[in-house]
Image (spheres, helix red, strand yellow):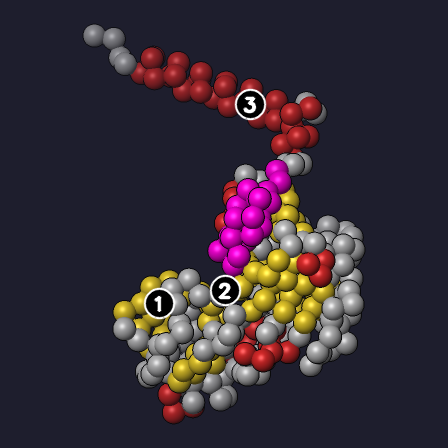
Amino acid sequence: MKPRFASLSVLLLGHLSSSLTLADQAGRKFAENSLHALPALQITVGHVNADIQGTDNRALQAAVDYVANLGGGLVLIGPGQYLMRDSLHLRSRVTVRGHGAETILKKDREHRSPLAADADFGEAAMTLQNPDGFKIGGGVYLASKTQRNFHGVCATILNGRSNYFTLTRSMNADLMVNDTAFAATIFPVISGYNLEDAVVENLTIDGNRAENPTHADGCRTAGIFSTAATTRSSTTAWCATTTAMGSVSSNPMMSGWRPAWWRIALDSDCTLGAGHNDLW
């Protein structure tokens, strides 16, 4: 009886030859390769007459995620006000563009509750005294009297039962009931982590100060927040602020605005527009 290794060798060699051919073609400067590197996908979001119709963060996020999953492109947000119950989570190689003062991302009203049980370091859950207003899919900020700023955490609520909720992120510190630990539905209106070539331009962010009384301390509860983000060489590729006067910076590590105290308008060149009133 002849060994069966011969047919297996032929299959392996055939697969290896095919792989090498594909790798070789990918390295050549064919027209289709340059097109793959520069996706031109464009999706519109709006109240009406858009690819994705909606008036809140879910419609915006659906568009951003769809474009990101296909390699990148443009999300064009139409005129109107969009209620933000959680951050618009940016994705790499996606440009988010509005219609200036006519496109307003407005934060929803704040709900706040003391914690009913300690939230320990590394735990991705919270137990609230009053769960009213805390919804699955909504954004939340957890902190305490002494563990705030970078020791607090912003997350999205994943699931819940009664007053117990699971979260997308774990605690950065022990948040103790005896240290007045609390949760509040405050978060960056626009947020990005570990990004490459994320662009935000020509829109308005409204922190809804009248309905958001909690002082939003720390960059992660800013109006726009990014961390570990790399951008194109242009300083307008990623719009963020590092000073209380609202100057624009492309700081690749971390920067932001406080959402509860700011109304931010970004012009088409990523500079602050006339709408940046009501500053901290």
The residue where tag 2 is placed is: 86
Whole-Å distance between the Cαs marked 2 and 3? 42 Å
**Up-down: is 32 above or below 73?**
above
Which residue is rendered at x = 65% and y = 58% of the image?
103
Q: Are marks 3 and 1 in contact (CB under 8 Å)?
A: no
Q: Is residue 278 visible in the rendered structure shown here?
A: yes
Q: Which mark is residue 166?
A: 1
Q: Are marks 1 and 2 in contact (CB under 8 Å)?
A: no
**Left or right of residue 236: residue 90:** left
Which residue is rendered at x = 64% and y = 48% of the image?
76
Query: In the image, which is nearer the foreground, mark 3 or mark 1?
Result: 1
Which residue is rendered at x = 45% and y = 78% of the image?
111
**Up-down: is 165 above or below 196?**
below
SS label for mark 2: loop
Give residue 198's position: percent from left, percent from top. 65, 52
Whole-Å distance between the Cαs marked 1 and 2? 15 Å
Q: What's the amino acid at mark 1? A: Thr
Indicate which disc, 1 or 2, sits on the residue closer to the N terminus. 2
Indicate which disc, 2 or 3, sits on the residue closer to the N terminus. 3
Whole-Å distance between the Cαs marked 3 and 1? 44 Å
Give residue 40's position: percent from left, percent from top. 65, 36
Q: Are marks 2 and 3 in contact (CB under 8 Å)?
A: no
Q: Which residues are magenta?
A: 41-60
Residue at the left extreme, as displayed: 1
Query: In which quadrant of the rendered image does the N terminus lie?
Result: top left
Q: What's the amino acid at mark 2? A: Asp
The residue where tag 3 is placed is: 22
